[in-house]
Image: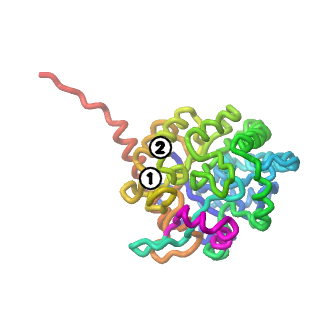
């Protein structure tokens, strides 16, 4: 297991890389070039600058997150071929600098969605929070406005200003696109990019939809075990893999998260993982919790054990954290609480490894 940390780059992340490297057990980052809109080619110059910057701090830069898929690809529009060609060019450029895994998602219109970005806990910390009743009361335009206001000017991952600017138009284009059709568009995308991945040695890793259910009548196709099974079957290649996010899949209590890790780890299809906890408060109602099992609804030890047993070489990172100790910054991406999460996950992993490598007790007779 390689412990990493999501980092947005100097101009976009309030956390200095110098602090990231001081987190115990941290080996590298999951990086992003936030200046690029979906569909644009990432230049070698910009990629090289990021990788050099990370290496200069003694950290690895082998995973890139959020090479976003242009909406026209998800919609299956004729313009998709040009965007797929751009995507392949970005993959080639990334591979030239040693990138091994590229995480993306295939969510229609919206990336992850919350109804509160600063939900106050009893201990004074704040966390991300979701209540479906509020979503139904608000509608997509209000949710976007609320999120933009609450995020304090920092763009949320995947919330593309260009796409959200023409929200009604994009939502209308999805009318008539059901889950089966969306999956066909997904297959077309994978058939276009996986040969490039195989040639340049990159594994694509899809991040599940968050929360793990349909929203606003849009067809979301990565919500549970059966969706994931269908995706890995669209193109049968290790380059078509998963970034299993425990908190995203775990937002739906019907998902057995440790079992999903175990099954797709055994099948060799997990390239990366986001490991965090979530606390169920009711139907389609949850808040993000501290990483510890005792603080939420997921069995974090069982998740780490599944990783140890089935995909021990995977890149892992803590995911969304709370704001604690007066920290301010990107909601979900603080330094302190994610550092605590990383340390906890590393502790679970060390304990699992040591317990499992102990010789079995022998029974002495006599
Ligand atoms: Mn995640």
Q: Residue at x 53, y 61 (%)?
A: 320
Q: Is residue 140 magenta?
A: yes
Seen in the picture, residue 204 relative to 331 is either above or below; the reply is above
Residue 218 coordinates in the image, percent (x, y)? 69, 53
Q: Is residue 188 left or right of residue 328?
A: right
Residue 142 coordinates in the image, percent (x, y)? 66, 71
Question: Magenta region: which residues?
Answer: 127-148
Q: Secondary structure at mark 1?
A: helix
Q: Is residue 348 left or right of residue 80?
A: left
Q: Write down the quadrant of residue 216 in the picture.
A: bottom right
Q: Nearer the viewer, residue 151 or 95?
A: 151
Q: Residue at x 58, y 38 (%)?
A: 226
Seen in the picture, residue 49 relative to 240 is either above or below; the reply is below
Main SS category, magenta section:
helix
Distance (Cα) linking label 2 and label 1: 19 Å
Residue 238 disc label = none
Residue 211 coordinates in the image, percent (x, y)? 57, 55
Q: Closer to the observer: label 2 or label 1?
A: 2
Residue bearing the label numbered 1: 345
- Sequence-wise, the earlier of marks 2 and 1 is 2
Q: Secondary structure at mark 2?
A: loop
Residue bearing the label numbered 2: 256
Q: Nearer the viewer, residue 85 or 131?
A: 131
């Amino acid at each position: 297991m390689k412990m990493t940390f999501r980092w947005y780059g100097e101009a976009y992340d309030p956390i200095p890389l110098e602090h990231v490297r001081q987190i115990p057990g941290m080996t590298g980052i999951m990086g992003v070039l936030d200046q690029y809109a979906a569909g644009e080619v990432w230049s070698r110059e910009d990629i090289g600058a990021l990788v050099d910057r990370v290496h200069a701090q003694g950290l690895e830069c082998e995973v890139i997150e959020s090479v976003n898929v242009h909406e026209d690809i998800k919609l299956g529009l004729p313009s998709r071929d040009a965007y797929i060609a751009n995507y392949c060019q970005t993959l080639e450029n990334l591979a030239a600098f040693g990138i091994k895994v590229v995480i993306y998602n295939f969510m229609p219109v919206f990336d992850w969605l919350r109804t509160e970005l600063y939900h106050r806990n009893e201990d004074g910390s704040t966390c991300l929070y979701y209540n479906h009743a509020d979503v139904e009361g608000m509608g997509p335009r209000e949710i976007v406005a609320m999120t933009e206001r609450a995020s304090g000017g920092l763009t949320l991952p995947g919330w593309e200003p260009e796409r959200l600017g023409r929200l009604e138009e994009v939502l209308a284009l999805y009318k008539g696109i059901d889950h089966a059709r969306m999956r066909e568009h997904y297959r077309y995308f994978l058939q276009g990019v996986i040969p490039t991945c195989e040639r340049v040695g990159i594994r694509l890793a899809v991040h599940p939809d968050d929360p793990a259910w349909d929203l606003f009548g849009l067809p979301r196709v990565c919500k549970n075990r059966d969706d994931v099974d269908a995706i890995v079957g669209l193109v049968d290649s290790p380059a078509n893999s998963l970034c299993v996010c425990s908190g995203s899949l775990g937002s739906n209590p019907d998902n057995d998260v440790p079992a999903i890790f175990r099954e797709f780890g055994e099948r060799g299809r997990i390239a990366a993982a986001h490991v965090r906890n979530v606390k169920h408060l009711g139907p389609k109602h949850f808040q993000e919790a501290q990483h510890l099992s005792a603080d939420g609804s997921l069995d974090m030890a069982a998740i780490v054990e599944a990783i140890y047993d089935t995909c021990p070489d995977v890149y892992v990172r803590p995911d969304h954290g709370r704001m604690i100790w007066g920290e301010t910054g990107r909601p979900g991406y603080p330094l302190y609480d994610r550092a605590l999460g990383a340390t906890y996950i590393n502790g679970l992993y060390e304990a699992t490894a040591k317990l499992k490598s102990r010789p079995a007790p022998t029974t002495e007779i006599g």
